[in-house]
Image (tube, rainbow, N blue to C red):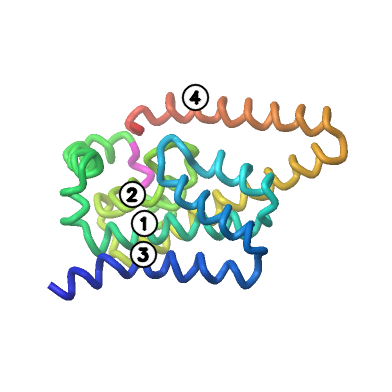
Amino acid sequence: PVAVIIRLIIPVVLAFVYFFSTFLVLPFQESLILGGLMLIYYVPPAGKESIIPIGIGLGIPWWIMAISLALLDILTSLFMILNFSIALRIPVLGPWISRFLASGDNFMETHPWISKWSVLGVALFVLLPLQGTGGVGATLVGIITGLSPPKILLAIGCGAMAECLVFALGSEIIWQLIMDNLLLGLGTAALAISGLILIYILIRRWQPGIRE
């Protein structure tokens, strides 16, 4: 049906419109690099914490990297909302979605703060530096929580933008330090990576219900 096709292509068309618009503000080569990184973002275990620093290191402005990846999370959520029944039939993704929804009650029991804080709770879930907290996982959490589609998109947009800004600004500072003082920059990068690993471990212990 035409309606199904329209729902399928809307997120894709929006992504391409955004990508081609970057040619207006970036050199041709950098826009191509950005497009490649946006595609790689969908290949596990790639995430914001790796794609954003790489993009900035390759010359893409930090704010464009932040906007680009946050937009991908929003568009992924939009795709899920518009095409949920189709997503269930996608190999690998579909079974993962089914398992996630089947464990919905258990998930909410181990994450009661998400339901309690509603939109803010889902936004904070997106902020967690774990796989499964991006556009797909956060949409499912929003559905389990009972949020309407607009509220799910709002929560994911706020959470993704905040997370992307943290990684983008942090990466920009570290790259500047590396350029000014190699040892200081590398030392700062090592501390940042160690901090992320520590946060990851603490969150996994604090929230055992989250699964990659």
Name the residue rendered at 39%, 31% in the picture. Answer: 207
Q: Quadrant of residue 75?
A: bottom left
Q: Are marks 3 and 4 in contact (CB under 8 Å)?
A: no
Between disc 1 and disc 4, the foreground one is: 1
SS of the residue under disc 1 = helix
Q: Residues within 10 Å of mark 4 (few under 14, many from 20)?
A: few
Label 4 is placed on what type of residue? Ile
Quadrant of the image containing the N terminus: bottom left
Label 1 is placed on what type of residue? Thr
Estimate the x, y position of residue 103 in percent, counting from the top left.
Answer: 20, 36
SS of the residue under disc 4 = helix
Estimate the x, y position of residue 6 in percent, counting from the top left.
Answer: 24, 72
Estimate the x, y position of residue 161 in percent, counting from the top left.
Answer: 53, 56
Q: Which residue is mark 3?
A: 12
Between disc 3 and disc 4, the foreground one is: 3
State the residue in front, 112 or 79: 79
Quadrant of the image containing the C terminus: top left
Reading the chain from its start, which is encountered first: label 3 or label 1?
3
Reading the chain from its start, which is encountered first: label 1 or label 4?
1
Residue projecting furthest to the right: 180
Q: Which residue is mark 1?
A: 76
Q: Are marks 3 and 2 in contact (CB under 8 Å)?
A: no
Name the residue rendered at 33%, 46% in the picture. Answer: 137
Reading the chain from its start, which is encountered first: label 4 or label 2?
2
Reading the chain from its start, which is encountered first: label 1 or label 2?
1
Reading the chain from its start, which is encountered first: label 3 or label 2?
3
Q: Quadrant of residue 29?
A: bottom right
Between disc 4 and disc 2, the foreground one is: 2
Residue range (magenta): 111-115
* CA–CA distance in space, label 3 to label 2: 15 Å
Q: Which residue is mark 4?
A: 201
